[in-house]
Image: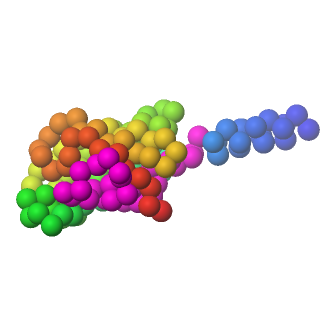
Amino acid sequence: MKKILLLLILVSFQSYAQANKFTGTWSTENCKSCSKEYVLKLNLAQSNNKIFGTAEITSSNEKFVSGVMEVDGNVYALGEKAQISIKGKDGSASAVLFVKEDLLQFAKRGGDDLVPKETILTKLY
């Protein structure tokens, strides 16, 4: 009986540790305090501590349009912070993501001017 209880406890810890908070489609189109000159859209998939996906900036102004960019990165231990790199045809940039409920804070750390410096994204689905 003790072995079964120990196994159930370990399974519950594993399922908690694998809560993929970054998985989904995130966008600035529903942000009330964001600039409406462009829309940043991230499609992310998280597998344990790795993140993969795509990013795209759309706008009516041609200087903001980026095309589809590749995203990859790592999630920190507690799962609420991630370091990502974004690679596009015009260069690359790095950023930090912070997730809380259905909001994602995007903070650029360096690289080319492919993405905005800081913005808040909401989860679409």
Residue 42 screen position, x and y as percent: 33, 56
Relative vertical location of residue 2 with respect to residue 34 in this rendering, above or below: above
Q: Does residue 124 appear anywhere in the picture?
A: yes
Magenta span contains residue 13: no
Residue 94 screen position, x and y as percent: 23, 41
Relative vertical location of residue 70 with respect to residue 16 in this rendering, above or below: below
Residue 12 screen position, x and y as percent: 71, 42
Residue at image point 52% right, 45% down: 101
Residue at image point 32% right, 55% down: 28
Horizontal relation, residue 100 to residue 96: left or right: right
Residue 110 screen position, x and y as percent: 17, 36
Q: Which residues are magenta?
A: 17-46
Q: In the orientation shown, which residue stands out farthest toward the front?
A: 32
Viewer-nearest residue: 37 or 26: 37
Viewer-nearest residue: 49 or 21: 21
Viewer-nearest residue: 84 or 108: 108
Residue at image point 11% right, 63% down: 61
